[in-house]
Image (cartoon, grey):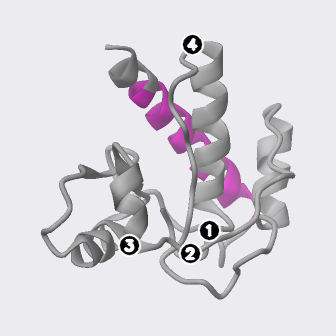
Amino acid sequence: MCTGNICRSPIGEVVLRAKLAEAGIDDVIVTSSGTGGWHEGDPMDPRAAAALHRRGYDGRSHRAREFRREWFADRHFVLAMDTGHLAALTRQARGRVDVPIELFAEADVPDPYYGEDAGFDDVLEQIEKAADRWVDRLRS
């Protein structure tokens, strides 16, 4: 999960899905969403899609959506792109949800939205490394 579901979390969704497929792990469903709904229905940011495309991924089918509390019941993990999103998810769970809420990567994935195009490539690289760790974890 990220803020608007048009940059970091859709990159994470596309990359993790691809890496799981490469590893032959086909029983994991990966989705993404945002803390807010102001981009609901929009495609991912063109800079995010371009960064994905440059690395051989396809993010064209993504449409932004806002995370809903009731989704906790259908998830095995809920992953946040930064500690702010982690806190928002934890508040939304209100201690009544028995689903691990964790960071996607070892460190906060920075929001590239207000920066230069190169920031999207940096985020993609960080997400690829984190996705490799998730594949290893889910393989175990």
Label disc, if present, on residue 5 of the rendered structure:
1
Front position among marks 1 and 3: 3
Identify the element where label 4 is drawn: loop
3D distance between C-alphas at marks 1 and 2: 7 Å
Q: Quadrant of the C terminus?
A: top left
Q: Say which label, 4 or 2, has the lower sequence index.
A: 4
- Drawn side of residue 62 relative to residue 120, left or right: right
3D distance between C-alphas at marks 4 and 1: 26 Å
**Which residue is denoted by mark 3 in the rendering?**
69
Identify the element where label 1 is drawn: loop
Q: Which residues are magenta?
A: 117-134
Rendered image quadrant of residue 45: bottom right
Residue type indicated by callout 3: Arg
Identify the element where label 2 is drawn: loop
Residue at image point 59% right, 40% down: 125
- Estimate the x, y position of residue 43 in percent, counting from the top left: 81, 67
Residue type indicated by callout 2: Glu
3D distance between C-alphas at marks 4 and 2: 29 Å
Q: Are the residues flagged by discs 1 and 2 in contact, CB closer than 8 Å?
A: yes
Label disc, if present, on residue 66 of the rendered structure:
2
